[in-house]
Image (cartoon, rainbow, N blue to C red):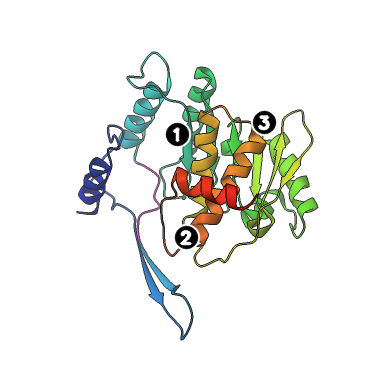
Amino acid sequence: EDGREMRHQLARAGIGAELVVTDETRPTTVKTRLMGRAQHRHPHQVLRIDRESRDPLPGRIATELIDALTSVISSEGSRHRIDAVLVSDYAKGVCTPDLLSAVISAGRGAGIPVIVDPASGADYSQYRGATAITPNRTETSRATGRRIATIADGLSAAVQLQSELDLDTAFVTLDSDGIVLSESGSSAVHVPTRRREVYDITGAGDMVLATIGLSAAAGCDPVTMARLANTAGGLEVEQIGVVTVSRGEMIADLLGGV
């Protein structure tokens, strides 16, 4: 039922679902958030209940998905123009090392950016060769073995990730401190953000990934990508739950911060 509802919502939004693969052996991941409100305070999440499977995709399903993805990414097999590939790895068993390797290789071969939001606690070697990754402070600390208490710590960690994983760019999100990034052949850069009233961080990481991906598809430079991602992520955490952020909202926010 949850899978059918997801397909229905994709269709309503005009989003193509040709690459959505059905696996009868596992449930569609569902997260149920229980919200509470203390007196005179905004609602906040007190508990989340997940219904999911974290088992790796079975062989037949994995092969079907890999073949479909690599075909649509490659210029020869694509019926639609692909400008960027975003990988949001939630460690649910879909982003296997084989799938990641195939997608990254296909993207490189087609000249299409592949941008990854890594799974928490994952072996980052499986993201080697991606165009960019977007881990947060905690994830970066685990991946590099560094304590990231300052912006300088973040800059050093970004340089380490970019070099060790052979990335074009490593973006490290530092919540209220903004984003630091390290580009191949350039000095690491800190892109600050303005302070926000944080109501709910749900969806912030995906919003940053989506904005960086859209900016990459549009041909923006990495610093511009980070600036736009700061804005979109900031607008996300100012609202309760997972919300969309429009172009108009981003323009208004950018102009208001000038």
- The amino acid pointed to by label 1 is Leu
Is mark 2 in CB contact (under 8 Å) with mark 3? no
Quadrant occupied by the N terminus:
bottom left
Q: CA distance from mark 3 to mark 1?
A: 18 Å
Number of the front mark, 1 or 2: 2
State which tag comes first along the sequence, 1 or 2. Answer: 1
Magenta-colored span: 51-57
Circle 2 residue: 202
The image position of residue 213, as x and y in percent, is 51, 36
The stretch drawn in magenta includes residue 54: yes
The image position of residue 241, as x and y in percent, is 42, 62
Left or right of 162 in this view: 85: left
Secondary structure of the residue carrying numbered label 3: loop
Main SS of residues in magenta: loop
Q: Nearer the viewer, residue 85 or 127?
A: 85
* Residue at the image point whose x is 66% and y is 51% from the top: 140
Residue 31: quadrant of the picture: bottom left
Q: Which mark is residue 143?
A: none
- The amino acid pointed to by label 2 is Thr
Q: Residues within 10 Å of mark 2 (few under 14, many from 20)?
A: some
Circle 1 residue: 99
Mark yes or no: residue 41 visible.
yes
Secondary structure of the residue carrying numbered label 2: loop
Left or right of 12 in this view: 234: right
Q: Which mark is residue 166?
A: 3
Secondary structure of the residue carrying numbered label 1: helix
